[in-house]
Image (cartoon, rainbow, N blue to C red):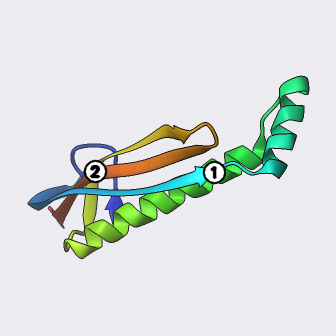
Amino acid sequence: MIIVTTDFVTGSTIKEVKGFVRGSTVQSKNIGRDILAGLKNIVGGEIRDYTKMMDEARQLAIGRMTEHAKEKGANAIIAVRLETSSVTSAASEIIAYGTAVIIEET
């Protein structure tokens, strides 16, 4: 599956647009991470546990979006975007979305 943020895939022609696809996940904080985050807030620096958690959440959302595109018979996803929003004070949603297409190399 080719995944791009552009509206086209260089060297390819869009043969068919299959439509909107998306994948999302909601990740919640945990007490261990919160304690470490509190300490980092005092001394400063990257909160690596949160960075890892959000990276895993992005990968999961992209994977779900890819599965949605495969279900539609697509071989590429164009105009991909990622967004994050707070669901509660202790949880965030990551959503990946784009347009599923069938492309052919030119």
Q: Which residue is mark 2?
A: 98
Name the residue at 78% across, 39% down.
Answer: 47
Name the residue at 42% across, 49% down.
Answer: 95
Using the image as rendered, state which of residue 11 and residue 39 is in the foreground.
Answer: 39
Can you give x and y, in whole percent of width and height, for residue 23 in the image?
38, 58
- Identity, as a three-letter code, of the amino acid under mark 2: Gly
Can you give x and y, in whole percent of width and height, for residue 92 in the image?
55, 44
Give above or below for 100 relative to 34: below
Using the image as rendered, state which of residue 70 and residue 83 is in the foreground.
Answer: 83
Q: Is residue 44 visible?
A: no
Name the residue at 84% across, 51% down.
Answer: 32
Question: Residue 43 vs residue 20: left or right?
Answer: right
Asked if labels 2 and 1 touch by Cβ distance under 8 angstroms, the answer is no
Name the residue at 64% across, 42% down.
Answer: 90
Disc 2, SS = strand
Count of numbered circles on the image: 2
Q: Nearer the viewer, mark 1 or mark 2?
A: 1
The Cα–Cα distance between marks 1 and 2, rounded to whole angstroms, is 25 Å
For label 1, count other residues whose C-alpha is less than 10 Å away and answer few (under 14), some (14-19) or many (20+): some
Instruction: Identify the mark nearer the N-term, 1 or 2.
Output: 1
Q: Which residue is mark 1?
A: 28
Using the image as rendered, state which of residue 9 and residue 45 is in the foreground.
Answer: 45
Quarter location, residue 91? top right
